[in-house]
C-alpha cells in the first residue's frame, strides 16, 4: 500500500493540484490506495463514471463519490478550494483566522470561509485520543491585556487577557 506523496512546499502544491481532476485523483489514491472497494459489499468490481465523478459497484449498483464521508461531502465549494484551505490551515504557523482564509481563497463570503475552517478544525481532532497519563507537564500563560497609551506598571488589564493552558505527556 503506497499512498501518494504530499507536496513539500507551496510550489509543489500549486504544481500538483492545478485542476479539479488532479485533486479528485489524489483523493481517490488516498482513500483507496489498492483500488476502489464498495462500502456496502466490499467488492472491488467497479467502474468509474467520469460524468458524475463516482464509482459504481458492479455487484450492487451503489454509487460512491470520492468525497463521500469526508468534510467535502455535500459542499458546494470546489474541491480545489478545500485542498487550498487544508494547505493554508496546516502550514500557517500561528493558525489562520476565518477572515484570513476568506481573503486568501476569495470563496463566497465570510460564512463560506467559516464553514470550511470549522469543518477542517473539527476533523483535525483525533476522536479516539486518550487522556494524558503518567508524567505530565503543564504550564499556563496570559495572552493579551495591553492597554493602548499606557506604559510601565498597570499596562496589563486583566479584563482584556486570555488564559492559555498547555499540557504534554512525558515518556
Image (cartoon, grey):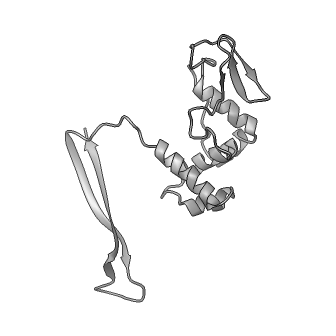
| 130 and 54: which is toward the camera | 54
Q: Residue at x 74, y 39 (%)?
A: 20
Identify the image quadrant of residue 51.
top right
Q: Picture coordinates of residue 46 (x, y %)? A: 69, 15
Q: Picture coordinates of residue 125 (x, y %)? A: 42, 43
Residue 55 drawn above or below residue 117: above
Q: Residue at x 61, y 40 (%)?
A: 72
Q: Picture coordinates of residue 78 (x, y %)? A: 70, 44
Residue 1 drawn above or below residue 72: above
Residue 70 drawn above or below residue 105: above
Report the side of 142 relative to 112 (left or right): left
| 155 and 74: which is toward the camera | 74
Q: Which quarter of the figure is the N terminus placed in?
A: top right
Furthest-left residue in this view:
134
Residue 87 drawn above or below residue 99: above
Q: Picture coordinates of residue 168 (x, y %)? A: 29, 47
Q: Residue at x 38, y 79 (%)?
A: 146
| 75 and 131: which is toward the camera | 75
Identify the image quadrant of residue 14.
top right
Q: Residue at x 30, y 37 (%)?
A: 130
Report the side of 65 relative to 150 (left or right): right
Amino acid at each position: 500500500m503506497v499512498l501518494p506523496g504530499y507536496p513539500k512546499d507551496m510550489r509543489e502544491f500549486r504544481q500538483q493540484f492545478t485542476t479539479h481532476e488532479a485533486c479528485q485523483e489524489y483523493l481517490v489514491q488516498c482513500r483507496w490506495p489498492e483500488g476502489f472497494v464498495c462500502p456496502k459489499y466490499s467488492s472491488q468490481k467497479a467502474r468509474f463514471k467520469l460524468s458524475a465523478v463516482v464509482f459504481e459497484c458492479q455487484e450492487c449498483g451503489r454509487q460512491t463519490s470520492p468525497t463521500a464521508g469526508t468534510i467535502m461531502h455535500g459542499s458546494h465549494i470546489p474541491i480545489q478550494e478545500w485542498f487550498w484551505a487544508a494547505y493554508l490551515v496546516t502550514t500557517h504557523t500561528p493558525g489562520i483566522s476565518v477572515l484570513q482564509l476568506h481573503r486568501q481563497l476569495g470563496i463566497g463570503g465570510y460564512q463560506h470561509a467559516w464553514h470550511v475552517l470549522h469543518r477542517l478544525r473539527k476533523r483535525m481532532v483525533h476522536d479516539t485520543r486518550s487522556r494524558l497519563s503518567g508524567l505530565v507537564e503543564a504550564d499556563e500563560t496570559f495572552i493579551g491585556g495591553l492597554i493602548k497609551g499606557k506604559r510601565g506598571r498597570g499596562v496589563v488589564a486583566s479584563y482584556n487577557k486570555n488564559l492559555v493552558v498547555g499540557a504534554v505527556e512525558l515518556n
